[in-house]
Amino acid sequence: MATLAALTLADARFPGGGHVHSGGVEEAVARGLVTCVDDLAALLDGRLRTAGLVAASFAAAAAGGTGFALLDAELDARTPSPAQRTVSRAQGRATLRAARLAWPSDALDALCAVDPRPHHALLVGAVVGAEGGTPADAAQCVGYLAVSGPASAAIRLLGLDPFAVNAVVTGLAGVLDGVVDSAVRSAAGPVAELPAPGAPVLDLMAQAHVTHHREQVRLFAS
């Protein structure tokens, strides 16, 4: 069973600032690439298999509580979009404020010693591991967040049926299980061999969103 820490971090009500990020959905909607539930399902599936897998793998590795400097550097290297790196660290910093109060630990201190704005996936892994969770717990939490946040954003942006969108998320259970299994297996090996699947479209949309966010009124920061 997942730890309370993992369940809390995956809860949309957790005050970690996740509600201001769409994970690329807002840019995709603006470009007419996502207009309906089926479009959203395809985007979430791809996001989970790429960016979600990378984040889940690093969260699983961080649950071990050591090697944060190398994990930080390797995750930076696997995040080619500067906008994506900024978003990851912004979410990590926002989550850190609540995490320090809820789950103070040596692991969290060690992670922040590497960078006071830690990547969100590493922070989640450090917290879950320090609270007795497994690498699988950390990977599942981060993998779920990779699709649940964008799904919620799509409801707000397109007025989609929330019941249908919820069904899309639960329909990804098999993909999420596969991502968690892969993340846990890779986390047991060298950090340099953690997964690095590319998502060029998501990277490009993240960069474009930064520009559009400055020029136009946008609902989400990413």
Image (cartoon, grey):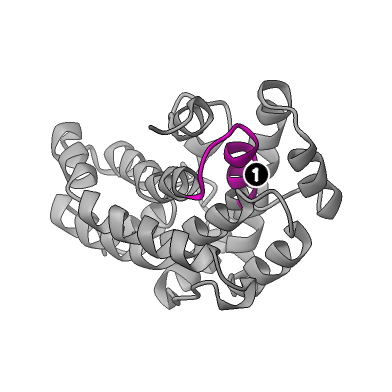
> With 6 as the anchor, is 105 left or right in this view?
right
Q: Is residue 160 visible?
A: no
Tell me what residue is drawn at x 23 percent, y 49 percent. 173
Residues in magenta, as a range? 122-135
Up-down: is 81 above or below 52? below
Residues packed near mark 1 inside 10 Å, few (<14), some (14 to 19) or many (20 plus): many
Q: How many marks?
A: 1
Secondary-structure class at tag 1: helix
Tell me what residue is drawn at x 13 percent, y 39 percent. 164
Up-down: is 199 above or below 39? below
Residue nearest the viewer, comparing 207 with 107: 107
Tell me what residue is drawn at x 51 percent, y 58 percent. 55
Q: Is residue 2 visible?
A: yes
Residue nearest the viewer, comparing 129 with 12: 129
Principal SS element in the magenta part?
Answer: helix
Up-down: is 119 above or below 132? below
Residue nearest the viewer, comparing 17 with 65: 65
Quarter where residue 98 is shown: top right
Give percent across and percent down for residue 150: 37, 47
Please tell me whether residue 128 belongs to the stretch shown in magenta. yes
Give percent across and percent down for residue 155: 27, 38
The amino acid beneath tag 1 is: Ala
Up-down: is 220 above or below 196? above
